[in-house]
């Protein structure tokens, strides 16, 4: 059985990295997930990210997000670099894992490109759609978890972490446009997206995500869990 791709999205500081780790911990303790692993149906649980999920992607991530270099990246060039990262990521990491039946938890995917480069940078949404389609070979997530958080709150969290990357240092208006992008996507394509209030305590957010994922797991693997 083909594996599942679960993507975490949201503005800076929304808690994606924390919640991906919490979900991995919860799945490791789940009797249903353990049973599927014991049967060899889900051989692996993989955590990855964009940009930077491959060796090529690590170099692109440094170029795209390092705030200390003096390279000025034009918006269209930025878009193409993210597409290159995604194409390599899909071919090298994600598709092989899904073909093995594994689960992939990914920090950012195509929604981020629409939100950041489309709404944030103002690039053509049709072009972005076509590039995403080409880079992913048509792959769409089985579930996207959007951690909804006020931009100001997210940026304050990011600032408390220490040094800020190139995206985090962008002006407030840019991040507000990005947030509108995520909001628009949630309204347009609700069928594979779960919206969660990221302002809640981390434990409450993790509990909601755990419930959503286990409900989907029960549906996706019903024939195997019924035996």
Image: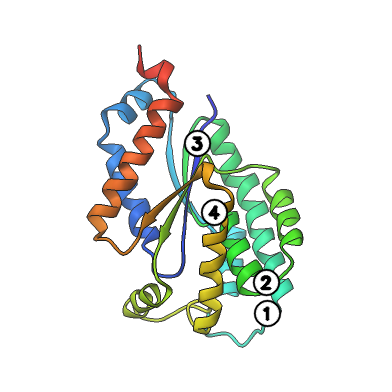
Q: Nearer the viewer, residue 110 or 33?
A: 110
Label 4 secondary element:
helix
Which is nearer the N-term, disc 3 or disc 2? 3
Q: State the residue position of label 2.
A: 78
| Foreground tag (4 vs 3) | 4
Q: Position of residue 117 (x, y in %)?
A: 64, 69
Q: Residue 73, labelled with which disc? A: 1
- Could you tell me which residue is drawn at 33 percent across and 30 percent down? 33
Near-viewer residue (66 or 201): 201
Q: Callout 2: 10 Å neighbours few (<14), some, many (20+)?
A: some
| Cα–Cα gap, marks 3 and 1 | 34 Å
Few, some or many residues within 10 Å of mark 3 (<14, 14–19, 20+): many
2 and 1 marks in contact (CB < 8 Å): yes
Quarter where residue 14 is shown: bottom left
Mark number displayed over residue 199: none
Q: Which residue is mark 4?
A: 187
- Label 3 to label 2, Cα distance in Å? 28 Å
* Residue 60 percent coordinates (x, y): 61, 67
């Amino acid at each position: 059985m083909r594996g599942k791709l679960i993507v975490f999205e949201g503005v800076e500081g929304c808690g994606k990295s924390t919640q991906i780790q919490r979900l991995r911990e919860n799945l490791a303790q789940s009797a249903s997930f353990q049973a599927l692993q014991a049967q060899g149906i889900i051989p692996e649980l993989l955590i990855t990210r964009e940009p930077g999920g491959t060796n090529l992607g690590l170099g692109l991530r440094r170029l795209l997000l390092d705030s200390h270099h003096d390279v000025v990246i034009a918006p269209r060039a930025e878009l193409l670099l993210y597409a290159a990262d995604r194409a390599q990521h899909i071919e090298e990491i994600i598709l092989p894992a899904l073909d093995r039946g594994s689960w992939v938890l990914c920090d950012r995917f195509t929604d981020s490109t629409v939100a950041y480069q489309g709404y944030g940078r103002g690039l053509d949404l049709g072009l972005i759609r076509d590039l995403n389609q080409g880079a992913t070979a048509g792959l769409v997530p089985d579930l996207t978890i959007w951690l909804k958080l006020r931009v100001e709150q997210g940026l304050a969290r990011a600032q408390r972490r220490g040094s800020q990357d190139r995206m985090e240092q962008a002006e407030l208006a840019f991040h507000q446009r990005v947030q509108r992008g995520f909001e628009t996507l949630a309204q347009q394509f609700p069928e594979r997206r779960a919206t969660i209030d990221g302002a809640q305590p981390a434990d409450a957010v993790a509990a909601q995500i755990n419930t959503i994922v286990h409900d989907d797991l029960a549906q996706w693997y019903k024939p195997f869990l019924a035996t």
